[in-house]
Image: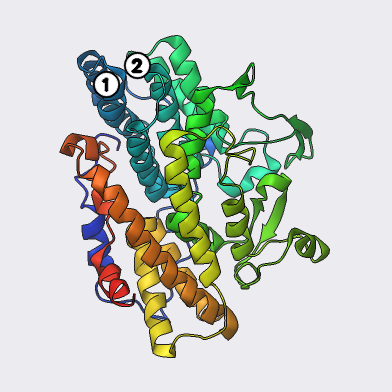
Amino acid sequence: MPGERRKQQSAAQRCAGELHAGLSATGEARPAGDTADGVGRARHHETSFKPAPESMYIRSAVAAAALYGVYPLLVRHAVVVWGSEALDAVGFSFEQADSGHGLGHFTRDYAHAMRLIRGLNIPPQELLTGLLGGIFHDIGCAMVRRYDEPRRIARHAEAGAILLEELFQETSLGLSKVEQDLVAYGVAAHTHYLKSMDVVSAEGITRKLEPYVDTINDKPILAVWLPRWVDRLDVNGAGFVGRHYLTLVEQHEDFSGSEQRFYTVNFEDHLRPLLRTPEEIKAADGNRTMREHLALFASSQNNQSPYGKHDLDLMVVMRDKQTARLQRIIGSITPTDPLHPAVENEIVDLWTIFLACNVEPTRRGRETAETLAARFRELPEDTQHAWCKGFLATMQEYIGWAEETMSTLNKLSPAERRLGNIVEDITEIVAPNQLWATTISSMR
C-alpha cells in the first residue's frame, strides 16, 4: 500500500543481487508486461487519483514550499519531496510504464534538469514551471500504454497533465493557480506535434489532434519548451539507444517525428543495420530501422530544426555533446570487421546488465533485457555483428556521459539526490554499474 511499503534496496543492490550469478543465453524469462502479479495491466481508467488528505507528502511539500521561498531552491528541494511522495501516495509505480519510459528515464530527466538549472539565463519563475514539467513529463506512461497512442486522442502526455491537476487539488506547493496550470500544460504539450492529424480511435471514431500552442508573439512559452528540452536530452546520446532498444520487446507503432506519422516496429526488422535515405525508406515499406530512427533524432538536434529552434545557453552545449555521442554510436553499427565470437557473446551479456542496472533498473526492465538477449542471439549473424559493435560503443559513450553528469550530481546534497520513496540516491542509477563498466572500460 502507498506509504506502507517496506524500505527497498537500492537500485545497485537489487541489480547486483539479481544479475551477479550471470546471464543464461537459453534462460526462459517471462515476457515483459506478463508478470505474475499483473505488472503492465494498468490503464488510465484503472488508476485512482485520490491521495489521502493527511498523507505525508502534503505536509512535507507545504513545509518545503514555506522554507524554500526562492524559486531555484524550491525546484531543487521541494520538487523532490512533493513529486516523488505525491506519486507514491497515489500508488504510482514505474513498473506500470514500458521499459523505455520508466524509472531510468525519470532519473535521467531529473539529472538533466538539475544540470540545466545551473546554466540557463531564464527568470526564476519560468525555470520553476518549466523544470517541474520537465521532470514529470512522462508520468502518464504509467497510465496510458505509450504505444497504444496511434489510436488515442488523449495520450500519455495528457494523462500526465490530468494526474498533476488532481495532485494540485490536494496541495498547491506554494504555486499560484497560473503556475499550476503552466506545469500541467507543459506536461501535456511536451509531445511536439508540428501539424494537425486525424486520429481514428479503437471504436472507429475520427478526431482531429491539433498541435499545442507553444509561442506568444513568436516568443517561446518556456513552460512548454523546457519540458521538451529535458526530454530531448534523453532522446539523444547513449541512454536513448538503450531505452529505445528496450521498447522492442513487443511489436508496436512508433512516431516518425518530422514526418509526423506512425510506422510499424518489430524486433528483427528494426535491428537490420541499414542506414538509408528518406527516399529509400519510403520506396520500401516506410518502416525505419533502429539505426535510421536514431539518425532521425540526431539530425533534428540543432537550432535549424523546428524542435531545437529555441535552444539556448547550456541546453545547446548539452544537446551538442549528446548528439556527438549518438552520431558516433550510429557510425559504429556496421557488419564489417566483426568482433571475435567470444567477445560478442560477452558484450551481449554486459549489454543486458547495462540495460537492467542503468537504463531501466526495475524488475520489468531486467525481465525485458533478459528476454531481448535471448531473442538477439537468434538474429542473422550480420545483424549481431553490427549491433555488438553498437552495444559496445553505446556503453563506452554512456561512461563518458555519466562522468560528466556525476560531476554535477556529486555537488548536490543527499536530500537533493533522493527522490522520496522512489530512488534513495539517483547517483546509483546514473553511475555506470561496475558489473559491466569495468570490463567495457578495458575494451577501449
Q: Quadrant of the N terminus?
A: top left
Q: Is residue 228 left or right of residue 116?
A: right
Q: Position of residue 378 (x, y in %)?
A: 54, 81
Q: Is residue 76 visible?
A: yes
Q: Position of residue 222 (x, y in %)?
A: 50, 24
Looking at the image, which residue is at 37% across and 14% down? 175
Q: Nearer the viewer, residue 39 or 178?
A: 178
Looking at the image, which residue is at 40% across and 18% down? 123
- Checking the image for residue 171, the label placed there is 2
Measured in 3D between alpha carbons, the distance from the residue under mark 1 to the one under mark 2, in whole angstroms, is 8 Å
Looking at the image, which residue is at 64% across and 65% down? 289
Q: Residue furthest left?
A: 414
Q: Is residue 189 left or right of residue 11?
A: right
Q: Is residue 435 above or below residue 362?
A: below
Numbered marks: total: 2
Q: Amino acid at mark 2?
A: Thr
Q: Position of residue 385 (x, y in %)?
A: 52, 81
Number of residues whose C-alpha sits closer than 10 Å to that of mark 1, classed few (under 14), some (14–19) or many (20 or more): many
| Upstream in sequence: badge 1 or badge 2 | 1
**Residues at marks 1 and 2 touching, judged by CB atoms closer than 8 Å:** yes
Looking at the image, which residue is at 44% across and 51% down? 321
Q: Is residue 395 left or right of residue 274?
A: left
Q: Quadrant of the C terminus?
A: bottom left
- Checking the image for residue 61, the label placed there is 1
Q: Which SS class for mark 1? A: helix
